[in-house]
Image (tube, rainbow, N blue to C red):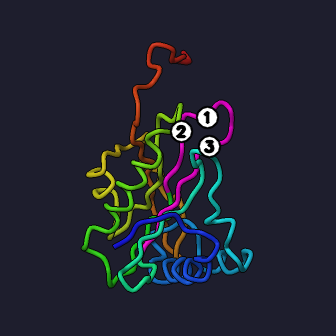
Amino acid sequence: MTIRFLVYKDIVLYREARLRSLKESPFAFSDSYEDQLKKATDFYDEIEMTGSPPEKFTLGAFSEQDELVGFVKFKRDQRSKARHRASLHSLYVIPEFRGKGIAKMMIIELFKIIEPIPGLEQLQLSSIISHNSTVSFYEKMGFQMLGGILEKDLIIEGKYVDAMYMVKFLTPTLQSNTINNP
């Protein structure tokens, strides 16, 4: 298994995997298959790496046959007041390769890549709470619940689904400088 940045030559593989993820796992993502089809056909904006060190990228997991079997996206918040945080999103492994630790390998590699980013303190994500929720996986990877459950966050296939925000603190935060509103 090889974990690496997705690049322009991977667009066709990524597009197929992304559309497959949304079609076969609609309760795992806030994006829909239909909405994704309406986006630009090249999908380059989703995998383009920016920054040095990288502040936006998509990692892919490739089998020995060079098949894209999973991906995860990372994006640092670009607003000056929020540069201390980033988001992890769209984690996916194709069903035939699940249970082999690939998601864990991608997250560990992502942690290694973002560790040297100056000023990055938090990695946040949102997780849809469903029958095959990834919440326990994220907890094992060091994330914790941030706030409460967002009830009826989305409507998927005519059903309300709840969601939760999670965070992994990467460095000590400025606790002493926190302003609390009365």
Rendering coords of residue 6 (x, y %): 55, 68
Rendering coords of residue 74 (x, y %): 53, 54
Residue span colored magenta: 70-88
**In 3D space, how far apart are the residues under numbered discs 3 and 2 (Cα atoms)?**
6 Å
Q: Are marks 2 and 1 in contact (CB under 8 Å)?
A: yes
Q: Crowding at label 1, few (<14), some or many (≥20) Cα neighbours within 10 Å?
A: few
Rendering coords of residue 87 (x, y %): 52, 49
What residue sits right under mark 2 in the picture?
85
Q: Amino acid at mark 2?
A: Arg
Q: Secondary structure at mark 1?
A: helix
What residue sits right under mark 3 in the picture?
77
What residue sits right under mark 1 in the picture?
82
Using the image, tell me which numbered label, if any, was put on residue 74.
none
Q: Crowding at label 3, few (<14), some or many (≥20) Cα neighbours within 10 Å?
A: some
Q: Are marks 3 and 2 in contact (CB under 8 Å)?
A: yes
Residue 84 inside the magenta-drawn segment: yes
- In this rendering, the answer to whether 19 lies above or below 79 is below
Rendering coords of residue 91 (x, y %): 44, 65
Front residue of this view, candidates 168 and 162: 168
Q: Amino acid at mark 1?
A: Ala
Q: Secondary structure at mark 2?
A: strand
Q: Are marks 1 and 3 in contact (CB under 8 Å)?
A: yes
x 31%, y 45%: residue: 142
x 33%, y 54%: residue: 138
Q: Quadrant of residue 168?
A: top left
x 32%, y 70%: residue: 131
Q: Secondary structure at mark 3?
A: loop
Sequence-wise first label, 3 or 2: 3
**In 3D space, how far apart are the residues under numbered discs 1 and 3 (Cα atoms)?**
6 Å
- In this rendering, the answer to whether 29 lies above or below 116 is below
Q: Amino acid at mark 3?
A: Asp
